Amino acid sequence: MSQAAIDWKGVFPAVTTQFNADFSVNLDATHRVIANLVRDGVSGLVVCGTVGENTSLETEEKVALVEVARDAAGGRVPVISGIAEFTSARAIRVAQAVRAAGADGIMLMPALVYSSKPFETAAHFRSVAAAVDLPVMVYNNPPVYKNDVTPAILASLADCDNIVCFKDSSGDTRRFIDVRNAVGERFVLFAGLDDVVLECLALGAAGWVSGMSNVFPREGETLFRLAKAGRFAEAMPIYEWFMPLLHLDARPDLVQCIKLSEELAGRGSALTRPPRLALADAEREVVEHLMRQALATRPTLPDVGL
């Protein structure tokens, strides 16, 4: 498998998981959320990522969410499933389960909780990739998941044919240059942190796994396409308008912020599954203020073929 075997580019919202009042998964509501994203022109979908509350879900729920996303996507865009488990063995089992459910690829996080050494981090990715015949996106998010997948660790995985993509949420855009200097164009590069996306695209990222594009998918996809076309003069006003909201993606409570914004935009529910609880009143008011501003000053979007 190689980069040529996948067509991952553009904006892939890390879609939210919708819950009922009793915190059970609401598959119908999740289907509607995803179908609306596809309708609005996103290029792909990531289910069961950080924003999808992966670590609060049971394996059977993750499988059901992949099936729902596949149905809502209708073959129009790829569906990638996040894999976030405590051990390599559990990650392998979940990866095989979502493959059977029809996932087009997996977004694999380091083993959770354990602070691994670099060779252990690499071994985790290597073992899971070897156990499932799906393209793998390596997900690096050291502020949240503690283990840093450095360019050197990624380069050591270049011989794993189905590890094809690197999503970086470190916020350090120099990583993309370091990866390219180490292994050329071996990996498809994806931006993973919303508030440095334009910088990542300028450095060659092919795609963006986005939190706030759940709320403003057309704006996110337009921003992406403008940047990829080198139309930065047109992209900058959209980026500046979007930035106060994009900063929410870098907070520890990003899931609550994104889901509240989604609810305020009429696209989903703010309800999260414990241990995630609703924002405190003062924090909620900040998000509400940002959303009021964003909706009142929503930019006119240039034509990018959406």
Image: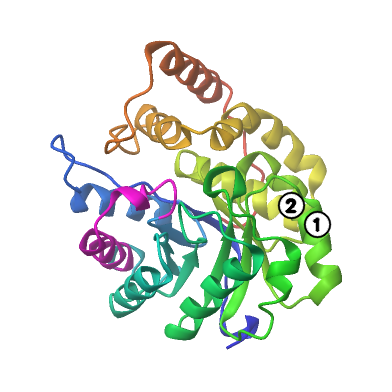
Give residue 195's quadrant in the image.
top right
Asked where in the image residue 285 lies, by quadrant, the reply is: top left
Q: Main secondary structure of the magenta part?
A: helix
Query: Looking at this rendering, what residue extends furthest in the left direction?
Result: 22
Residue at 13% x, 37% y is: 22
Secondary structure under tag 2 reads helix
Mark seen at residue 200: 2
| Most foreground residue, 276 or 289 | 276
Residue 299, percent from left and from top: 62, 31
User: x, y percentage for residue 223?
Assistant: 66, 46
Q: Is residue 133 above or below residue 74?
A: below
User: Is there any visible trace of residue 199 in the rendered image?
Assistant: yes
- Rendering colour mode: rainbow
Residue type (three-letter) at the residue carrying disc 1: Leu
Q: Which residues are magenta?
A: 49-70
Quadrant assignment for the C terminus = bottom right
Report if residue 61 lies within the magenta region: yes
- Count every numbered label the image shows and give the total: 2
Dot 2 amino acid type: Cys
Corner quadrant of residue 10: bottom right
Residue reaching furthest to the right = 181
Check disc 1 and report the residue beneath it: 203
Q: Residue at x 77, y 76 (%)?
A: 185
Query: Taking 211 as reference, is 175 above or below it?
Result: below
Mark 2–mark 1 Cα distance, whole angstroms, equals: 5 Å
Query: Disc 2, disc 1: CB below 8 Å?
Result: yes
Which residue: 73% across, 33% down? Answer: 237
Rate crowding at label 1 as few (under 14), some (14 to 19) or many (20 or more) other CA atoms within 10 Å: some
Q: Residues within 10 Å of mark 2 (few under 14, many from 20)?
A: many
Residue 4 placed where, x, y %?
63, 84
- Answer left or right for 117 relative to 104: right
- Position of the N terminus, as image quadrant, is bottom right
